[in-house]
Structure formats: structure tokens, C-alpha cells
Amino acid sequence: MEYKRKRKILAYIMMIILSIFFIFPLFYMISISLNPDETAILKNMATIRAFFPAEFSLKNILDVFERMPFARFLFNSTFIVSTTIIIGLFVNSLAAFALARFRFMGRAFLVSFVVALMIIPFEAIAVPLLLITNRLGWLDSYIVQIVPFIANPFYIFLLYQFFKSFPSELEEAAIIDGASWFGIYWRIALPLSRPILASVAILHFLMQWGSFLWPLMVTRGPTYRPLTVAMEVFFGQYPRNWGDIMAFAAMMTIPVLLLFLFLQDTYVNTVSRSGIK
């Protein structure tokens, strides 16, 4: 018993250390973003005093809105991410349901092909994809930032694993009652898949919200520019005030934290049951 107690205490100590390690930069960012004194920020940046500014103010946040159309960039990112997730959940879940529940020639090959696509990095197809979208006339638009990322082999595989566990009795009963396959998918499979759909939505949100390379390649001006590219442009502007830069970064980070805090129970439960880890 004493040995188990020591192991438990050690585990808690390690978790506390890891928590501090991950919270440290977040707390640092928020503290500097609320410090209106740029001179004090530069003076105390490498000291513990940076975490405890003498004055707290929203000046840096207001400066961001004055120096750049932040609201426009926030709308662009929100619209692109939400549209991609909504359409992506439907497309990926529909493809996964077909692979999991239908029996047809070449099904095993398609599943293997989906798994193989998961190992291809986006950087390997970025240039060919850029040439294709350029030929289609999609550059500098919302479409070019949404359509290429609707279908994702990783999400299809996660949903495929989930749909495979559905009992066949549900399908048989629905077919006897006259339901079509799409009706089974829409009325039975989707309602029972809310936990895994929430997890896929979180993963998709994190990937799209933090996407930088592709928006940098396909946007030409501020009209369709998301927050990630706007952050890079903002960082290159002068005067380079670290308080404003941290305020911009904080306003980018807060939506991600709020989404995860809102859906954390669903996400953790799905991870433990579906084997995402």
C-alpha cells in the first residue's frame, strides 16, 4: 500500500509539473498582452516580473483593432473553419459509413488507400494543389481555403472504426421497417455518433484554425486573409510592440481554449473509447 501511495503521489507531482510547463507560455502571453507599458515589457521580458505587470489594461487589444482590421480576419477564420467542419463532418462521416457498412468489391483496397493517404504530408501536395486551384481560378477566395480540406483520410478512418462497431441488428430492423441506407445513416448512425463527431470537429478545428502554409500561398490581400497569415503580417509591421503582438496572439488562442473547455468531456470520453490515443 505504501508503494502504491508513493507512486500515486509521484504521478500527481509529474502531472503538476507538466501542467505548469504547458500553462507557462499561455500565462506569459496573457500577462504581456495586458501590460500597457512597452518599456516595462522590454525591460522585464526575461524576468519573473513579466508575469506581474504593475498595471493591467486593454490598451494593447484596442491597438490591434486600430492597426489592423482584426474583426475582418476573425470573421474570415471563423467562416472558413466553421464551413469546412460542417461540410467535412457530413462528407467524412458519409464516406466512413459506406466503407464500414457496405460490402462491395474493392472495399478492402479503399480502406487501405485511405490509411495510406494518412501518411502523406500536406507539404508534398501543396504545390500541385496550388497549380490546380490556380487553373480553376480559385486563388484569393474562401473556396480555395475550404474545398481542399473538407475530406480528410484521418477523420474518415476514425469514423470508419466507430461505424464498424455498430450492431447489425439496428440496420436489419431499420431495413425491415422500410428505411433506406441514407435514412439509416441520417436517423440512426449520426445521432449515435455524436461523441466521435465532436472529437473530429475539435481535431478539424485545431488543424484549420492554425493552418498557415496554405493560406499564405493562396491569399493575395486582406480580403480573404485568415488570422494566422494576418499575425505574420502584423509581426512584420513597425513599430513592433510586443504588447500588441501578444494581444493578437491571445485573441487567436482564446477561441481554441473555449471550444476545448466546452467539449472536453466529450473529447476525453471518445478518446478513451475509440482508441484515438
Image (cartoon, rainbow, N blue to C red):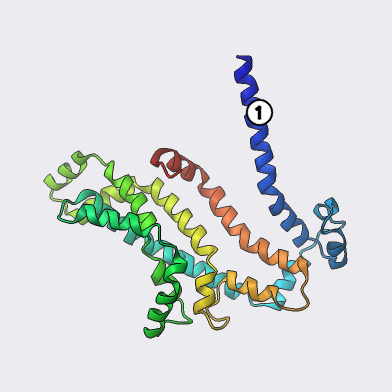
Residue sitting at x 87%, y 67%: 39
Left or right: 133 as drawn, with respect to 261? left
Q: Position of residue 101 (x, y in %)?
A: 21, 49
Front residue of 83/203: it is 203
Question: What amino acid is at disc 1?
Answer: Leu
Specify whether residue 48 is in view: yes
Q: Position of residue 135 (x, y in %)?
A: 37, 85
In the displayed structure, would residue 96 be above or below residue 242? above
Residue sitting at x 27%, y 54%: 111
In the displayed structure, would residue 73 be above or below residue 98? below
Residue sitting at x 84%, y 53%: 47
Front residue of 13/253: it is 13
Residue sitting at x 55%, y 72%: 226
Left or right: 149 as drawn, with respect to 181? right
Quarter where residue 68 is shown: bottom right
In the displayed structure, would residue 153 be above or below residue 171? below
In the displayed structure, would residue 24 be above or below residue 134? above
What kind of element bears circle 1? helix
Find the residue positioned furthest to the top.
1
Q: Position of residue 104 (x, y in %)?
A: 15, 54
Left or right: 191 as drawn, with respect to 122? left
Q: How many marks?
A: 1
Q: Position of residue 184 (x, y in %)?
A: 22, 51
- Circle 1 sits on which residue? 10
Q: Quadrant of the N terminus?
A: top right
Front residue of 32/8: it is 8
